[in-house]
Amino acid sequence: MAQHGQVLKLHGCRSDGKARWAFRYRVDGSWSKRPQVGGFATRDEAQRALRRELARLRPGREMTVTELIEEYLRIHQAAPSTIEKLRWLLSKSEEICAWRGTLPVTGSRQPRRCGKS
């Protein structure tokens, strides 16, 4: 099933009195998390951002380790200090992936791809 997402007008206005816009979408099916990203000046701006986000998340798309980490941290709900600690810890996986790519291929067994960072 194709993901469509939703663009919506936020309650309240910007400091200049104009409306604020946001978009939201389901991460994984109808009962999954529904991240909302807001602060857009126009409906068109929010719609373009939603299309970019859905294209980035389309099924079958290969993601790098860095992209996976950023996506996880973006939707993870925790205190800012926890997010920073997770970011630091997960950066180690990027380093391991980069190191693994420098290893020589021996025999017929090739190391699994980690993705480009």
Image (cartoon, rainbow, N blue to C red):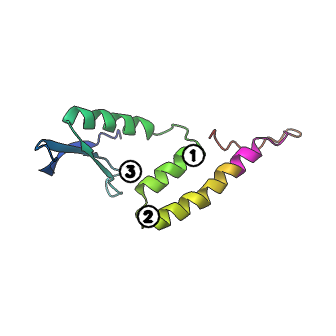
Image side of residue 32 versus residue 62, left or right = left
Query: Residue at the location (89% across, 39% down)?
Result: 107
Q: At label 2, which amino acid type do we have?
A: Pro
**Do we see residue 18 in this rendering?**
yes
Find the residue positioned furthest to the right: 107
Q: Are marks 3 and 2 in contact (CB under 8 Å)?
A: no
Comparing 9 with 109, the one in front is: 9
Q: Is residue 73 above or below residue 108?
A: below
- Type of amino acid under label 1: Thr
- The amino acid beneath tag 3 is Val
The image quadrant where one finds the N terminus is top left
- Which segment did they paint magenta? 96-105
Looking at the image, is mark 2 or mark 1 earlier in the sequence?
A: 1
Residue at numbered disc 3: 27
Closer to the observer: label 2 or label 1? 2
Q: Of circles 3 and 1, which is in front? A: 1
Identify which residue is drawn at 71% across, 44% down. 98
Which residue appears at 63% of the width and 38% of the height?
Answer: 116
Whole-number angstrom distance, CA of label 2 to CA of label 1: 19 Å
Q: Secondary structure at mark 3?
A: loop
Crowd around label 2: few <14 · some 14–19 · many ≥20 (10 Å): few
Q: Label 3 crowding class (10 Å Cα cut-off): few <14, some 14-19, many 20+?
A: some
Residue carrying label 1: 66
Cα separation between marks 3 and 1: 18 Å
Quadrant of the rendered image containing residue 19: top left
Q: Is residue 103 magenta?
A: yes
Determine which residue is flagged by label 2: 80
Circles 3 and 1: CB atoms closer than 8 Å: no
